[in-house]
Amino acid sequence: MYQERILLTVQDILDKEFKIDTRGYRPQEVDKFLDVIIRDYKEMSSIIRELESDKKSLVDDNIRLKQEVRNLKTKLDVIEEGSTTETSSTTNADVLRRLSNLEKIIYGRE
């Protein structure tokens, strides 16, 4: 995702050649600075890949949990429609408690 917005690769930086004038920069200083840039650039790319992977995992978990909440709500509706005895109301309380816990997990409430 972010890689399309980055213009240079590590190899582009490494292969960059500068023209030298009589009053130009010292090539050793430029090389040392480019080495630091390359190291940081590699680290940034690594961090971006890790974050993209984490984001995908979280999105997948969120989708799964939302589906689970929908399923539980559907089951709760079915149970409520058929509940007429004391045993059914206990089951409803358990389902409501579970549903509440899932919503806390999804929405981050404690």
Image (cartoon, rainbow, N blue to C red):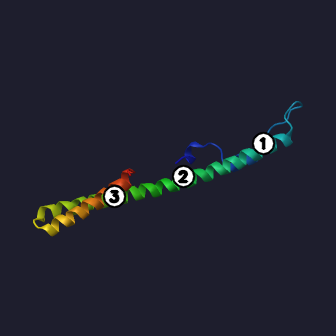
- Label 2 amino acid? Leu
Q: Position of residue 4 (x, y in %)?
A: 55, 46
Left or right of 88 on screen, residue 12: right
Q: Which mark is residue 74?
A: none
Neighbourhood count class around disc 3 (C-alpha, 10 Å): few under 14, some 14–19, many 20 upward: some
- Asked which quadrant contains residue 66, the reply is bottom left
Q: Which residue is mark 1?
A: 33
Please tell me which residue is depicted at 18% across the width and 60% down the height of the picture: 77
| Distance Cα–Cα, label 1 vs label 3 | 51 Å
Which tag is nearer the camera, tag 2 or tag 1? 2
Q: Which residue is identified by label 3?
A: 102
Secondary structure under badge 3? helix
Q: CA distance from mark 2 to mark 1?
A: 27 Å
Rendered view: 102 above or below 34: below
| Residue type, mark 3 in image | Leu
Q: Is tag 2's residue or tag 1's residue first in the polypeptide sequence?
A: 1
The residue where tag 2 is placed is 51
| Above or below 90: residue 7 | above
Residue 85, given in percent of the width and then of the height, sits at 11, 67
The spot of residue 36 in percent (x, y) is: 75, 45
Query: Dot 2, crowdedness within 10 Å: few (<14), some or many (≥20)?
Result: few
**Sequence-first tag of 1 and 3:** 1
